[in-house]
Image: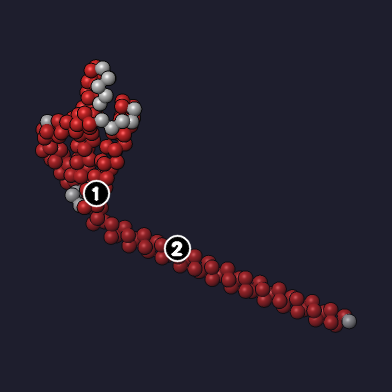
């Protein structure tokens, strides 16, 4: 921080970054909710952590550009980290159990909804395969009929050409 800046602007910057850190804690809370909701598989954790890191970088970069003219200042980073941990240790801890319960309830509801669909999916899939096979056989049959009709027309054209050639030969 430059010492030539007035104390009021320094305090304003620290409060802004404290608020940004608090909002980043809320964003992490949302990512954690989706982690609980989608299960703790490695791909889910990796993708949500990647989303969180990219979002944090974008927010911090844009706020640093607007409040500090692109200069990375240590008090701003410390206040952003303090805001993040303030959220995690206060509101995040208070809402952790209800969040887990709500995510579990949503997962159970989804399982209850999709379980009957899984039972009927085999029947639906076999019906769709039969429809597809019937349509494919109809397409094959029509293609074969077209080929036969084209072959008959071609033979008729060849016969009529031969007859015309024979008539021309007889006329000469």
Q: Nearer the viewer, residue 40 or 170?
A: 40
Residue 76 location (% of width, % of height): 23, 29
Q: Residue at x 21, y 38 (%)?
A: 28
Mark 2 or 1, closer to the camera: 1
Q: Report x, y in % for residue 40.
A: 18, 49
The structure residue drawn at horizontal position 25% and vertical position 22%, both measured from the top left corner, is: 3
Q: Which numbered disc covers residue 148?
A: none
- Above or below for 3 versus 96: above
Can you identify the residue that label 2 sits on? 135
Of residues 59 and 161, the one drawn nearer to the viewer in this rendering:
59
For disc 1, the marked residue is: 46
Q: CA distance from mark 2 to mark 1?
A: 43 Å
Looking at the image, residue 2 lies above or below residue 44: above
Does residue 62 appear to the left or right of 89 in the view shown? right
Nearest to N terminus: mark 2 or mark 1:
1
- Residue 8 horizontal side relative to residue 165, left or right: left
Quadrant for the N terminus, please.
Answer: top left
Residue 135's place in the image compared with 34, above or below, is: below
> Which quadrant, please, contains the C terminus?
bottom right
Q: Position of residue 70 (x, y in %)?
A: 33, 31
């Amino acid at each position: 921080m430059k010492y030539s800046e007035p104390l009021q602007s320094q305090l304003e910057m620290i409060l802004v970054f404290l608020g940004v850190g608090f909002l980043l804690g809320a964003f992490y809370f949302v990512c954690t909710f989706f982690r609980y909701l989608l299960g703790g598989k490695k791909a889910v954790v990796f993708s949500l952590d990647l989303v969180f890191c990219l979002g944090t970088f974008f927010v911090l970069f844009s706020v640093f550009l607007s409040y500090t003219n692109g200069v990375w200042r240590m008090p701003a980073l410390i206040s952003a980290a303090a805001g993040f941990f303030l959220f995690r240790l206060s509101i995040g801890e208070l809402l952790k159990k209800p969040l887990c319960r709500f995510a579990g309830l949503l997962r159970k509801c989804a399982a209850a909804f999709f379980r009957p669909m899984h039972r009927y999916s085999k029947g639906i899939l076999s019906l769709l395969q039969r429809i597809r096979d019937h349509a494919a056989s109809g397409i094959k049959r029509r293609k074969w009929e077209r080929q036969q009709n084209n072959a008959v027309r071609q033979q008729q054209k060849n016969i009529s050409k031969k007859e015309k050639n024979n008539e021309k030969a007889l006329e000469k």
